[in-house]
Image (cartoon, rainbow, N blue to C red):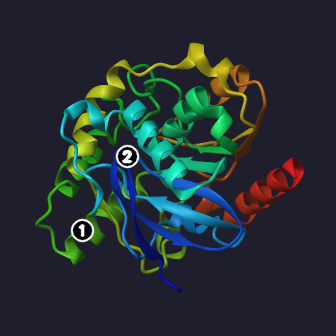
Amino acid sequence: MKSWNQMLVSTERGTFEIFTKGEGEPICVTHHYSEFNETGDYFAETFTKTHKVYLVNLREAGNSVKAIEPYQLSMLETIFDLEAIRETLGYEKWGFAGHSTGGMLGVIYGIFYSSSLKFNVIVGAAAREYSTFSSGCIYNKNHPKYKRMQELMEVLKRSDLSLEERNKLSGERTKLSLHNPEGYDEFFNLNIRKKISASRLNFFSREIQIFDVTKKLTLISTPTLILCGKYDVQCPLPYSLEMNELIPDLKLVVFNNSNHYPFLEESYLFKKEFNNYINELS
């Protein structure tokens, strides 16, 4: 598989490391605390056949600019960074696609900068804190897999893990969010490696406790596509259903045989739904 091309983009807010792949209309893809490299990302790979994908390492991730103040790691500041990147690249508008916490960034992007987005794809995400009152969420203390998920997240923050150790632990963590864990090797069969940015995750773990932008969802004017697995244990389906009720120009697709990774668990249907949606917009 062709690797991703690295570029460093110098903006008024600092220099950001970006990986690009594909041709066509531009789409920005990122995750709030992942650290990408030239091997890419499974979610981002989904869009490379139809779009030019800009996979962004956010502040503190990879070779991107460091944070001078802690608040620069917040979700809103992250959107300001993405806007600076878009402007520097010379796009009047681009698409955005985010999975999980990347999808949460998409929600905020739509609220504050709908005029900068041609479309917004939000996968397995939420517009507010999703664990405290959701016993079906794996981040809820009453969930049977809560303790193990927390242990794995903490260990994966470490920078001294060998590649073998990281892959093993990351695989175990991912299986906790698959509808069919036995299909892991089939779903994750590419040489894609990424890390967790500990500083970004640590800040997010605090910020999420007061996160709730549901009352601002009506401000989103960007055409929005929400996709969610029926059995999502990270950002459970009710949070996508909630956004479906509040975002004006929205289409919701629920994947009946997926957990948190419908773009892999039902990849053919996922791509079909995305492509149909984009074709409807053009």
Residue found at x 40% / y 76%: 38
Disc nearest the viewer among 2 and 1: 2
Q: Earlier in the sequence, mark 2 or mark 1?
A: 2
**Number of disc labels:** 2
Q: Nearer the viewer, residue 14 or 160?
A: 14
* Residue ranking furthest to the left: 160
Check disc 2 and give the amino acid type: Glu
Q: Position of residue 129 (x, y in %)?
A: 43, 24
Looking at the image, is 17 positioned above or below residue 239?
below
Q: Secondary structure at mark 2?
A: loop
Q: Position of residue 77 (x, y in %)?
A: 38, 34
- Which residue is the site of mark 2? 12
Whether tag 2 and tag 1 are in contact, CB under 8 A, the answer is no
Residue found at x 78% / y 30%: 249
Query: Badge 2: few (under 14), some or many (20 or more) residues near its Cα, within 10 Å?
Result: few
Numbered tag placed on residue 21 in the rendering: none
Q: Is residue 98 left or right of residue 56?
A: right
- Which residue is the site of mark 1? 166
Looking at the image, is 263 positioned above or below residue 141?
below
Looking at the image, is 177 positioned above or below residue 252?
below
Residue found at x 54% / y 61%: 43
